[in-house]
Amino acid sequence: MNIAEWLARRARVSPGSQALFHGRSCVADYAAFDARARGVAAGLRARGIAPGDRVAIFMGNAPDWLIGFYGILYAGAAAVPINAKLHGREADFILYDSGAVLCFVDAVHGDSLRAAGVSCALDAPADIEEDRPETGPVARAGEDLAWLFYTSGTTGRPKGVRITHGMIAAMALSYLADVDRVDGRDATIYAAPMSHGAGLYNFMHVQAGARHVCPPSGGFDPAELLALAEHFGRAHLFAAPTMVRRLTDHAVHHGARGDGLRTVVYAGGPMYTADILAAVDHFGPKFVQIYGQGECPMAITALPRADVADRSHPDWRARLGSVGRAQSLVEVAIDGGDVGEVLVRGAPVMPGYWKNDAATADTLRDGWLRTGDIGRLDATGYLTLLDRSKDVIISGGSNIYPREVEEVLLTHPGVREASVIGRTHPDWGEEVVACVVGDADEAALRAHCATQIARFKIPKAFVFLPELPKNNYGKVLKTALRSANAPPD
């Protein structure tokens, strides 16, 4: 089934329900949303775009992003959303690699691509709409490509993950079973890039007839977000852990309680225990954690709000430090015993990478997706991530998991952010280096660590920085930290 059928059905069932908002202004109900998507699909077909062709989107968060996206799906083509924060030359690589025949742009991103000299045709969704729209979504099978997702490329060129219509349906239904319920009273606020997790979460909100709100700022502004949540009520938000911390810091400082904010789903990087404790203490039981990858989008595990907020269970702290249990449509396993690489298989797992058989063969083995994450499962199925496999530090033959050290550092009141990396050492193989943002001194941090972790895990060096380098999604760039702190030749 073409996943865009969910929009077509919603438009038939509740055509007058409010659908798309720019700030507090409604710009389309579901009938208009559907009609405009059909018009875009007709425009694509008039330009010779056939089912299976790729059409990219390089735009800031806006209602037209969703209209263009559903127009692509209605035409039977595959969408290639590109993070709006990328440089035009970075976006050009994705356009070339995906073979996109057209790219939807707004004025700013169109100028960026033209400056990069792209050969792909560029248009705004509104500019290609036809007066005689398509009659309905083009039929697609569950295994057909719907979304070509490009990984962030922090360690090299990004790879295209093939996300199918069936994968999206599995992800969305798992969300309803394991993460949160959605109905027509809800509003989802797109404060994170729609090209990634925030955009993937549109589907269950379309199916339910909920409202879709694009902040006028086009991104994440804590004051704006809290004001929109209070205005709309029953607001849902997908956020990276760094966004949750910024939202909490702002709310505490300004005395905002988060009225109208119903659910914050957080993922995309490690959420440190100190940060989520502060968030729950201030906002209450509004937080749900999920764990996923582009290769299994948003659908590996979930830690429901009851677990995030619980302080009565004997193992509540360990559970809070986990990423929850397997979502309904996947199996999760550990390769190598108690601690090892996290493996996952099931309906939301990708069939492979785009035009990259070698990477597919390395990542999909014997039906299992090898996530590259190191973790452990407890007897009740809670998965705790220790680190990316490439981030594990081996010093003197012992494995040291950076996240464990980071968690300890972040319990010190003088530490705002911390990232732990390994650095080559002539005798020990690697040594532990802590990169810290805050006003604590080295002696205090060494003493603090000595009270909580083994001596061999205590950082041998501390690097104090004004901020940690991050990519466009708020993930710390450990590759940049390793490069900056490599020992001299």
Image (cartoon, grey):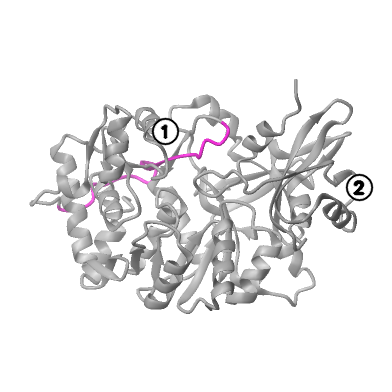
The residue located at (27%, 32%) in the rendering is 114
| Residue 241 point in image, percent of width and height | 58, 57
| Viewport quadrant of the C terminus | top right
Give, as a three-letter code, the residue at label 1: Glu
Classify residue 435 by image quadrant.
Answer: top right
Q: Residues within 10 Å of mark 2 (few under 14, many from 20)?
A: few
Give, as a three-letter code, the residue at label 2: Arg
The residue located at (23%, 45%) in the rendering is 75
Residue to which mark 2 is pinned: 455
Q: How many circles with numbers are drawn on the protein?
A: 2
Q: Give the mark nearest the N terminus, 1 or 2.
A: 1
Using the rendered image of the protein, determine whether residue 240 is visible from the camera's viewpoint. yes
Q: What is the magenta range?
A: 135-155
Q: Secondary structure at mark 2?
A: helix
| Residue 251 point in image, percent of width and height | 55, 72
Q: Which mark is residue 90?
A: 1
Task: Tell me: residue 65, above or below residue 233.
Answer: above
Residue 154 on the magenta segment: yes
Task: Tell me: residue 94, above or below residue 203.
Answer: above
Classify residue 384 by image quadrant.
Answer: bottom right
Q: Residues within 10 Å of mark 1 (few under 14, many from 20)?
A: some
| Residue 281 point in image, percent of width and height | 65, 75
User: What's the CA distance linking mark 1 and mark 2?
Assistant: 43 Å
